[in-house]
Image (cartoon, rainbow, N blue to C red):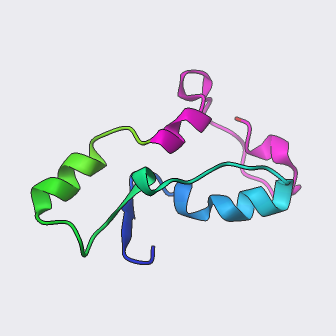
Amino acid sequence: RHGRLYTCPVIPYSQYFNEAFEQNLHESEDDSIDIYAAKSYDELAEFAAKRVPFCAYCDVKNRTHGHKWRQSSKTIDEYLV
């Protein structure tokens, strides 16, 4: 998005989550890399292989899968899975 590479698709669109649910998830410069400023493929690959600060918001250990697809109720609990 806008010339930046992210390790997760949630990060560049977190502003919409913040606006919709009056939250304050903070994206920092360290959460993405400028693809035009990167000096090599190796620099991009190294970035993509590491955990970024934004990862602290996700509770990966308790994440569940297999949720039934349905129309959104537009409530925050849909995101807390």
Which residue does the image show at 29% across and 50% down from the upper left?
Answer: 48
Where residue 24 sits in the image (x, y, percent)?
74, 50
Q: Residue furthest top?
A: 61
Where residue 19 sits in the image (x, y, percent)?
80, 63
Q: Assign the magenta stretch its main secondary structure.
A: loop
Where residue 30 sits in the image (x, y, percent)?
41, 51
Q: Quadrant of residue 61?
A: top right
Which residue does the image show at 20% across and 66% down from the upper left?
Answer: 38
- The verdict on residue 61 being magenta is yes
Q: How many marks?
A: 0
Q: Nearer the viewer, residue 44 or 67?
A: 44
Q: Is residue 42 left or right of residue 34?
A: left
Q: Quadrant of residue 35?
A: bottom left
Q: Write down the region rendered in magenta.
A: 53-80
Q: Is residue 51 left or right of residue 78?
A: left
Q: Is residue 35 left or right of residue 57?
A: left
Which residue does the image show at 54% across and 55% down from the upper left?
Answer: 11
Query: Would residue 72 be seen by someone viewing this image from the given angle?
Result: no
- The verdict on residue 70 being magenta is yes
Where is the N terminus found, in terms of image quarters? Answer: bottom left
77 up-or-down from 75: above or below: above
38 up-or-down from 72: above or below: below
68 up-or-down from 71: above or below: above
Q: Nearer the viewer, residue 60 or 40?
A: 40
Where is the C terminus found, in terms of image quarters? Answer: top right
12 up-or-down from 48: above or below: below
Q: Is residue 63 left or right of residue 53?
A: right
Query: Would residue 27 be seen by someone viewing this image from the given angle?
Result: yes
Where residue 25 sits in the image (x, y, percent)?
67, 48
